[in-house]
Amino acid sequence: MSSRHRSSRGGAAPPPMPRLVVPGRELSGPGEWPAMFGRSAPLVVEIGFGKDTFLLDRAAACPDDDHVGVERDPERVKAFLREAELRALTNVRAMPVSAELALGHCFEDGAVAELHVYFPDPISTTSGALRPKIERGSIGPAENGSPYFGNNSSSARRCAGVVLLWRRT
């Protein structure tokens, strides 16, 4: 039997770790992010952080913001959280769930100040259950937020905010 945990696609939830947030375990409702971080701050969410360090780098550069990474691959979540621990980042949490689950149930309307999606093709990737929620605004920007769609070309990918779906203005 594999020790690999696959909570977002069935199976057992991952064991507790510092900075890990599992809906229904550490997070019982969408309005609990201030309690998760011990403060109220702008909330920045990245969908599918994978092996990239964007969110960790942003958390280090923006200590006054709180950062939540959503990634359904448990091994990538563990590596992300180990790196957050090494960097002593207290403003980072990770959710080992799908984007649809995270954005559909884990954030109150208007709670997210910035939403980042850095997939190879974020428009087709978000064409399933996620894209209509973004377009309808059910997970839309926080008050004073403005939509922003960027180019995800290989040269633009190195810049922050390439596929930033919204940010506060």
Image (cartoon, rainbow, N blue to C red):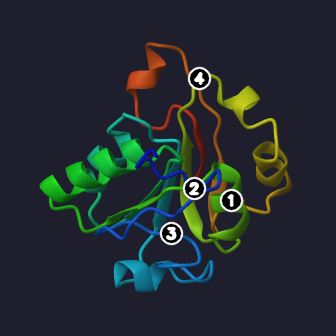
Which of the 4 image quarters holds residue 163?
Answer: top right
> At 62% from the left edge and 77% from the top edge, which residue is drawn?
30
Q: Which residue is tagged 3?
A: 22
Per the model, the C-alpha gap separating discs 4 and 1 is 26 Å
Across and down, in percent, residue 139 comes to 72, 61
Q: Nearer the viewer, mark 3 or mark 4?
A: 3
Q: Which residue is tagged 4?
A: 151
9 left or right of 89? right
Between 113 and 29, the one lying in front of the other is: 29
Point out the tag, 4 or 2, that comes first from the N-terminus. 2
Q: Are marks 2 and 3 in contact (CB under 8 Å)?
A: yes
Per the model, the C-alpha gap separating discs 3 and 1 is 11 Å
Q: Is residue 40 visible?
A: no
Local crowd at mark 4 within 10 Å, few (<14), some, or many (≥20)?
some
Amino acid type, mark 3: Val
The outermost residue toward the top is 154
Q: Which residue is tagged 1?
A: 101
Local crowd at mark 2 within 10 Å, few (<14), some, or many (≥20)?
many
What label sits on residue 97 in the rendered view? 2
